[in-house]
Image (tube, rainbow, N blue to C red):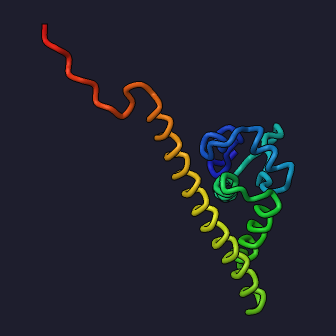
Amino acid sequence: MGSEHMQIGEVAARTELSLRTIRHYEDTGLVIPSARSQGGFRLYTEADVARLMVIRRMKPLGFTLDEMRDLLVTTDRLDSGDELSAAEREELVERVRGFEQATQQRVRDLRTQLERAEEFAATLRGHLPHAGRQLPAPVPM
């Protein structure tokens, strides 16, 4: 096994994804190990790790597996080095642009949710005894 390949445990540690999650993404076709060891262990490359990081970043934003797959197929096509017609390249770029705009909207929505959660936490603190109020200084004996 060359140093360019990693086993699933190392990939899990680097991506902060569980082994089960990585296997699930493999089962759904989002990421396929680049190779297998003689013993049948999954082997991954830096490109596979980068692909998993894209998936990891999309998940908390609420993108579906199909949307993740669509973006990955689109970026794979753009990055393939294959000759693309101007129309095909523009269509692919437009799809990526759509994902970027959807991501920006989801980030704004998350910021709004966070602000509301912080306001709620402050409201709750206001109901706790002595919360947010300075306690009187102790009286010297």
**Of all residues shown, which one is farthest toward the left?**
141
Residue 68, how many percent across, how many down?
76, 61
Residue 94 appears left or right of 30 = left
**Of all residues shown, which one is farthest toward the bottom?**
86
Residue visible at 71% across and 71% down in the picture: 75
Q: Nearer the viewer, residue 53 or 111?
A: 111
Q: Quadrant of the N terminus?
A: top right
Residue visible at 69% across and 81% down in the picture: 93
Whether residue 108 is situated above or below residue 113 in the rendered picture: below
Q: Nearer the viewer, residue 77 or 135?
A: 135
Residue 47 appears left or right of 141 = right
Q: Quadrant of the C terminus?
A: top left
Whether residue 74 is situated above or below residue 116 in the rendered picture: below
**Of all residues shown, which one is farthest toward the top?**
141
Residue 138 appears left or right of 26 = left
Whether residue 84 is situated above or below residue 67 in the rendered picture: below
Residue 126, how many percent across, how many down?
44, 35
Residue visible at 70% across and 53% down in the picture: 59
Q: Quadrant of residue 23?
A: top right
Residue 128, how many percent across, how many down?
45, 28
Q: Quadrant of residue 12?
A: top right
Q: Nearer the viewer, residue 44 or 52?
A: 52
Residue 66, how many percent across, how many down?
83, 61
Q: How many marks?
A: 0
Residue visible at 70% across and 75% down in the picture: 98
